[in-house]
Amino acid sequence: MTLVEEAYSVKSILVSLIESIDLYNFLLKNHHRQTCIIAYQIGNHYNLDSQVLSNVVLASAIHDIGALHVTERDKLLYIDAIDPEPHQIMGERIIGDFAPFVHISHIIRHHHIVYQDILDGKVNRDDIPIECFIIHLADRIDVLYETHPGETDFIISEINKRFGTVFLPELQDTFNKLASTPEFWEKITDDSFYDLLLMSINDASCVIDDDSLESLAELFSRIVDFKSEWTMNHSKSVSVLADHIARLYGLDEKKCFSLRIAGYLHDIGKIAIPIEVLDKPGKLDTSEYKTIKMHATYSSLILSRIPALGDIAKWAMLHHEKHDKSGYPLGKGAVDFTIEMDILAFADIFAALAENRPYRAALTQEKILELLKSFTPDLLDVSVYDVIEKNMSFLYEVNASAGKISY
């Protein structure tokens, strides 16, 4: 049975991923977008066939998806990246289970390939796709482009020093021909060119069905949840709880499925929140609380890039709203609520209370129920609470077994 109402193109997914990743990349704000443009130009000039060029576009657009912490991203700011292995491995793990992207997970795993490792016999040349070499080159060009603005002669010199040791020597002629033209540098920040290169992606083989949509939603959740050891399973737990509460409430299969997807996506905006705030062991001060509340706004910015999500995006974006208009980000009131919004809000609170956090241990069933009840009837729907209360032992076990992830 197909529950989604329309196809989800890989291009809309790609744009959303780029937006979500680059939102928290404060030092290289447009790094994925610009690396993608550079890689496309190199691959196109190198006469890659259309499928390989499409792989270059996809993989370069999300190549640093595994760089979840500020310290990891800081190491990538140097022309010779420091210890890139962890984020390459994590990137492969994050996207490896998403079927439409599985073919690029190996590319992301080796996108910092150093040519000297092949010369030294540490890596078999046949195991490394050409896409990896192109993305590594494009990635380092963009780092220099951002850290040395306007210094094209310097960038060209630094890149050329590394062909045959860091970069694949067969790409040197292509790079120098491109880099000698003003158009190459101008296109790096040209949004219209970026839109054109996305047209190189063949959507026909990447239609997203229900299973793939759920896999995509879980992929999105990993980008956020893997930032902190305290939230490793949070989105998975919210997804499973929302689905089960909805079923117990009597909602139909389509709404249960949609709530499951919304559960995975509800915290995607936390990708833009500093880890220092997310993992603070004590009470947040006023400024920090304002910062963390912004995740709901960021979620709106990201999820709005996939209009086909419809109500799924709406429920995900509004999971902190309350009936008395005290919630955020929009201050919605009871008149604006649907039962799905109440279910997702309760699932989020339930999951959070049942988790260990840096400032407290996980709470017992009794304490969770007590706190959930305090939200009714003024803040959230009492009928949803009643369903949770009647099925507390079952839901507590469901939550405990949800998302036993080991990454």
Image: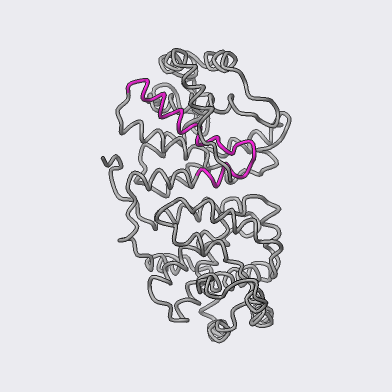
Height in image: 108 above or below 93? below
Q: Residue at x 70, y 41 (%)?
A: 276
Q: Residue at x 59, y 39 (%)?
A: 232
What segment carries the magenta color? Answer: 221-250
Q: How is the image coloured?
A: one colour
Provide residue 202's location: percent of width, then percent of height: 34, 64
Give the quadrant of the N terminus: top left
Q: Main secondary structure of the magenta part?
A: helix
Height in image: 45 above or below 104? below
Q: Is residue 78 magenta?
A: no
The number of callouts visible is: 0
Image quadrant assignment for residue 286:
top right
Q: Residue at x 37, y 48 (%)?
A: 212
Image quadrant assignment for residue 203:
bottom left
Provide residue 326's location: percent of width, then percent of height: 53, 24
Provide residue 300's location: percent of width, then percent of height: 47, 42
Between residue 139 and residue 300, name the one nearer to us.
Answer: 139
Height in image: 248 above or below 3? above
